[in-house]
Image: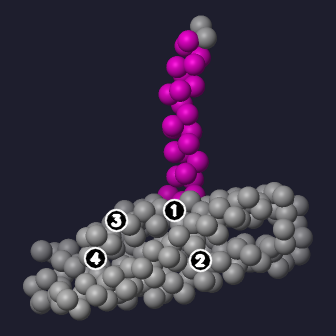
Amino acid sequence: MRLCVLLLLLTLTPALHAQGHENALSDAEVEILRDTAPLPADRVQAFIRFIDDRTKTIQTLANGPRKPGCEEDIHDLMEQVASIADDLDDNLDDYGPRHRDLRRVLPKLVAATERWSSTLRTPADHEAYNVQRKLALEAVRDIHDEAVRLVEEQKTWFHDHPPGKEDKDSTSGHANLEK
């Protein structure tokens, strides 16, 4: 009997962990990410919008009148920011070595990370979300560092390997899907 319970717990643990991670995005947002999968620049822009939405809500909660459950809402939003930021960082790690052209979106991403960091620091300290705030700030800092690194890497790469007319669609974040 104990063995059955142990096996059941071991099988459910990864599913429960994954479920918590997936709940950071709505079904509509997941669909947007699926649609933008072949378009790295558009996908990064979508991630920026998702995190912007959550940080704007955090700012509204932090600056607005105190409501019951506000701290828990801020905690959940910061948890979502950390999760989405981790997903974005994974995507950036994947795009870098493949030399996907993100030159137009990376400066926007760097500016966004600075905005997010500022907003995540806005709410007063509270035990309900201080740990989650730290995790979200670390995830945003990782994105910032990766984006800054990629800006320089892409400048060098595309200077040394200028895309030709036939290569433009294959390296661009806005590839022609009708080919």
* Total numbered circles: 4
Q: Where is residue 12 shown, x and y percent of the image?
A: 54, 31
| Disc marking residue 52 | 2
Left or right position of 49 against 63: left
Residue under numbered circle 4? 100
Left or right position of 26 against 103: right
Q: Where is residue 108 shown, x and y percent of the image?
A: 48, 87
Q: What stretch is highlighted in magenta?
A: 3-28
Question: Closer to the observer: label 2 or label 4?
Answer: 4
Question: Element at badge 3?
Answer: helix
User: The disc labelled 3 sits on which kind of residue?
Assistant: Asp
Question: Element at badge 2?
Answer: helix
Q: Which of marks 3 and 4 is nearer the N terminus?
A: 3
Marks 3 and 4 close (CB-CB < 8 Å): no
| Disc marking residue 86 | 1
Residue visible at 58% across and 71% down? 140
Q: Earlier in the sequence, mark 3 or mark 2?
A: 2
Residue under numbered circle 3? 94
